[in-house]
Image (cartoon, rainbow, N blue to C red):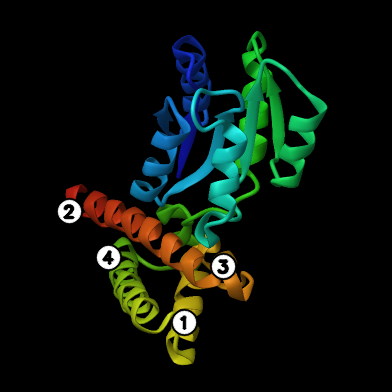
Amino acid sequence: MSILIVEDTEVTLLLLRNIAERTGEKVICAGTGEEALRLVDEHPEIRLLVSDVMMPGMDGLELVRRLRDRPEWSDLPVLFISGVSRKEAVLEAARLHSVGWILKPIDRPSEVLARIQGALAHYPPRLENPAQAQRRLGISQPSYVEAVQAFRGCMSEARENLELQGELDDSLERSLRESAATLGARALLSALDGNAESRGPRVKREIAALQAALDRVLTDADAAPKA
């Protein structure tokens, strides 16, 4: 999971990055709305946008409008930050389904951290912790790795199916749902339950991010000392 911070004032950006890193999540930074749009295409794992409202060029509200027009990002939680709280801007932020508003200057980092943590809670976990999943399922680490490899293969097939047909075959969707439920991939299940218009793009984005997460699980398993 990653947090994208968009802020054109370097000092504020550095402070926000420091605060966001306390969540334990990866933090990605952009100085403009245009740069942020490029970054979301490179990082399907982004789960929260923290954006300044007033920026040169594309402002934060326009950035979020453009993201909301893209089905795969229509549900992305957004926190706006601004030195002013004009009624019009606050109403537009609400219309864009933002989950909060942070006033600058930032002089209470603990409150900002609490808002970020609260915003992250809008998304279900991408993947259950491997050790927890093994205990819940009552399986060994090698068996868990075998299940992860099978799940990854199922997602690759689903991604190809979506690319070719725009929707999942029923049997493939059942396999994907069952595997996701077994391994605790709740964010993928949420995407599969999305509305018809955004479901395909959201599922593709979630699959891309989840495959990267599973690759890390497999890499960690290879690096672990063998009993």
Between marks 2 and 3 in the image, the one whose residue lies nearer the viewer: 3
Q: Earlier in the sequence, mark 4 or mark 2?
A: 4
Between marks 4 and 3 in the image, the one whose residue lies nearer the viewer: 3
The structure residue drawn at horizontal position 74% and vertical position 31%, both measured from the top left corner, is 89
Q: Which residue is labeled 3 in the image?
A: 198
Which quarter of the image is occupied by the C terminus? Answer: bottom left
Q: Is 224 situated left or right of 139 in this image?
A: left
Q: Earlier in the sequence, mark 2 or mark 3?
A: 3
What secondary structure is marked by label 2? loop
Give the x, y percent position of residue 184: 51, 63
What secondary structure is marked by label 4? helix
Residue positioned most to the front: 57
For the residues marked 1 and 4, what is the alpha-carbon distance in whole angstroms? 33 Å
- Residue 196 lies in what quarter of the image? bottom right
Label 2, residues with CA under 10 Å away: few <14, some 14-19, many ≥20:
few
User: Label 1 amino acid?
Assistant: Glu
Q: Is residue 100 visible?
A: yes
Q: Nearer the viewer, residue 53 or 26?
A: 53
Q: Which residue is labeled 2 in the image?
A: 226
Q: Which residue is labeled 4 in the image?
A: 142
For the residues marked 4 and 2, what is the alpha-carbon distance in whole angstroms? 10 Å
Q: Is residue 184 visible?
A: no
Label 3, residues with CA under 10 Å away: few <14, some 14-19, many ≥20:
some
For the residues marked 3 and 1, what is the alpha-carbon distance in whole angstroms? 11 Å
Q: Is residue 30 above or below residue 126?
A: above
